[in-house]
Image: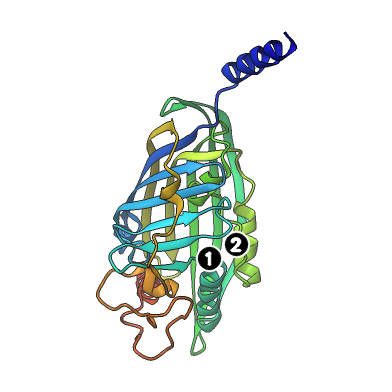
Amino acid sequence: MIKRTVLATALIFNLAVPAHAGWEFTSVTKAEGEQHSEMMNSTVKAWVDGDKSRVDFQQSGNPMMGAGNYMLSKDGGKTVFMVNPQQKTYAAWDMTNMMGMASGMMNMLNMKVENPKVEKLLEEDGGKVCGLPTKHYKFRTSYTMQMTILGMTRSSSHLKEEDIWTSTKLTDAGMGLWLRKNNTKTGNPDLDKLVQAEMGKTEGFPLKTISVTTTKESSGKERTRTVTMEVTEVKQSKPDAKLFEIPAGYTETSTMAAGSGEGSQGQSGRPGQHPGPSGSSGQDNPFLKMLQNMNQGQK
């Protein structure tokens, strides 16, 4: 009798508390305006289950995140791998190291970020995005960039106005792989100050953002870039555990080689070994390409 009561209670409990379900979503990012904006365009499909997540790049204008590649994480985005099925390679995606490279370029060009300021202009009910309730925020971010080369100083003012719709219904830590707030330290005090100013602005994960950035050079030249990111579909699902595993037989390589789907393998052929400087020029390096294009956009 006692055994039957225990079993009945357990059955009722299991029916009342549904099994944990993960998530599946599609996100589209579009950019327009100034030169090289197309590098920010992307369409991704993602699967999330607790701390585990996978983001597939269906379309991408970024050479570091080529179409067909995907990102994997099993710890809520703390450790990330970029996987290249075409080349059967994978690499640790070290944002700290990449941001350090960006910081090094800033130091090399004597670039300084001055007077960063972030203003919250609005916080209100945002209605529903993909059936999920959201909160709508408006922010204005401004700062001045100075760059000195051969004793000549150029300055530019930057103004970014953002509309952000976030939801607190997506609680799985794995959402942070793509729908994330970046708190990576760059090592550049001025830039870190700006990044920190951007932090902690919202609660929950962003389901839609519209960002309009206006840059005005000291010469009077002005340009504008508009970037829109929107989750176009989101639903609960139970992803196959195999989605979050690196396929057997794939070779570990460097981040630079893993992001590129164009010919050069950039690898030693043995797992765990990263390629040396020989055989990889700046022209073949997608990260340097991206930085060079960004730098050209400042001219």
Q: Can residue 145 be seen in this view?
A: yes
* Left or right: residue 77 compared with residue 292: right
Screen quadrant of the N terminus: top right
Q: Can residue 34 be seen in this view?
A: no
> Are there few (<14), some (14-19), or many (20+) residues within 10 Å of tag 1?
some
Q: Which amino acid does label 2 sit on?
A: Thr
Q: Are marks 2 and 1 in contact (CB under 8 Å)?
A: yes
Q: Gap between marks 2 and 1, in whole Å?
A: 7 Å
49 versus 4 height, above or below: below
Q: Which mark is residue 184?
A: 2
Q: Height in image: 86 above or below 209?
A: below
User: The C terminus lies in which quarter of the figure?
Assistant: bottom left
SS at circle 1: helix
Question: Which badge, 2 or 1, comes first in the chain's sequence?
Answer: 1
Residue 188 in the image: state x and y as whole percent: 62, 72
- Residue 169 is drawn in which quadrant? top right
Left or right of 37, for residue 7:
right
Q: In this view, does 121 lie to the left or right of 60?
A: right
Residue 144, x across and y down, in percent: 55, 64
Residue 95, numbered label: 1
Q: Residue at x 36, y 61 (%)?
A: 65
Residue at screen point 45% across, 55% down: 245
